[in-house]
Image (cartoon, grey):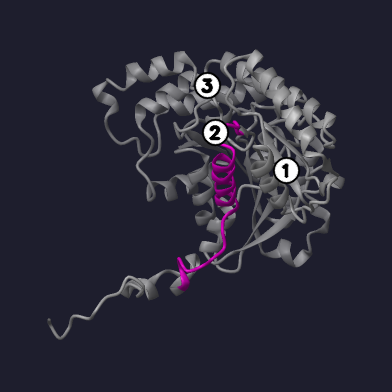
Amino acid sequence: MSTTEQPTSETADPYFQQLFADRIGGANYGKGTAIYKFEKIKRAKRKALADHPQRELLDFGIGENDSMAAPQVRKTMEAEVNKPENRGYADNGVAEYKAAAARFMQRQFGVQLDPETQINHCIGSKPAYAMLPACFINPGDITMMTVPGYPVAGTHTQYYGGEVFKLPLLAENGFLPDLDKVPDDIYRRTKMLVLNYPNSPTGRTAPAEFFEKVVALAKEKQFIVVHDAAHIMLTFDGQPRSFLQTPGAMDVGVEVHSMSKGYDMIGWRMGWVCGHPQIVRAFADVKDNSDSGQFIATQIAAAAALDDDSIPAAINAKYRRRAEKLVAVLKDCGFQCEMPGGTYFIYTAAPKGTVDGVEFPAAEDATRHLIEQHGIVTVPWDDAGPFLRFSVTYVAADEAAEDALMEETRQRLSAAKLRF
């Protein structure tokens, strides 16, 4: 054996263990024992199936549309995928998709955008939240984010040496952040405020006056606003509202849209960023150094979807119907909940335990109990009090199947004898 070779062991760290970046844990990367909550849910599901192999899981934890994209969208994709001119890199997007997004914004919200300077596509909205902090965050800067919420912009803020200031969404505030309680020293260091309405997971929609307050604050305190509009076409309590409809909003920020929720295009990875041209340009510059654009055929199929308002209307009607049914069942079983203003999520206070003495110190404990003992899957949120999230994206072939699932849910929740 060479004198330079060293014995190896399966338990020994690789030589590069010391090279991992601090942002992902440094030398301790991969050695943590914490378990992500969705992994805990997966483990509880496996246990429930092993302990009760004949009992079907009622899965209200899935947070993605249960249907395929509309036939006309798939037909467009089928045609476009065979065109040689669509084979190359798309870079920062094709004109057809940007123009369709501009028409959508004008038609749905009365928001006029220049597709060349105020719209840029993204490969789903998630990468947009990963890239936007690169445009603004330096070490010591702050991104304000609501909790519970989608963490990606915060994660990347911290990657760049910034900090996240959490804005809890509380029932007593109507699940809107209390911006009056933010200290001045936080505002002085804030570069970005990330909002999301209709809100995931609370289901709350934001009134016009809240967005007006946000615009005024952004100008006064000098930060930009990033509005996550992924669920905007799943608005149930009125007309969908874009942040960019707000007077002055175009001066302070951008809105990020997704084709997933409102168009059954989960997995197609299509979205767009729109708003102030200088912010859109900065995003495009970062994106240019991060990816080479979504497949052109996908963009053209998505453009066809955006031009067909019957698609989001049908999806909205389906999830509104399902939400109404589930809210009725949950209320009958003791949950304090109401129809959400939007999204396909029902967000409700978690039970405290069962009448026969089982205690649930946190929502996570309630989730595990419901899965393992009753075969009902939910997602726990303990960020701003113990809450459970029920999604109406379960698989059901028709309304009769929905009703059968609701009756089974009612029976199992009643048998659980939950205490609130």
User: What is the count of numbered marks?
Assistant: 3
Spatial CA span between label 3 and label 2: 11 Å
Q: Residue at x 62, y 36 (%)?
A: 229
Q: Answer yes or no: is residue 196 visible.
A: no
Q: Classify mark 1: residues with Cα within 10 Å, few (<14), some (14-19) or many (20+).
A: many
Front-most of residues 162 and 199:
199
Front-most of residues 349 and 320:
349
Q: Secondary structure at mark 1?
A: strand
Identified by mark 3, the residue type is Leu
Q: Secondary structure at mark 2?
A: strand
Q: Residue at x 44, y 50 (%)?
A: 286
Identified by mark 1, the residue type is Leu
Q: Is residue 385 left or right of residue 121?
A: right
Is residue 46 inside the magenta stretch?
Answer: yes
* Quarter of the figure with residue 346: top right
Farthest residue to the bottom: give it: 3
What segment is highlighted magenta in the picture? Answer: 28-57
Q: Residue at x 26, y 25 (%)?
A: 85
Residue 7 in percent (x, y) is at 24, 79
Residue picked out by circle 3: 306
Q: Quadrant of the C terminus?
A: top right
Q: Is residue 88 left or right of residue 387?
A: left
Identified by mark 2, the residue type is Ser
Residue picked out by circle 1: 388
Residue picked out by circle 2: 258
* Quarter of the figure with residue 4: bottom left
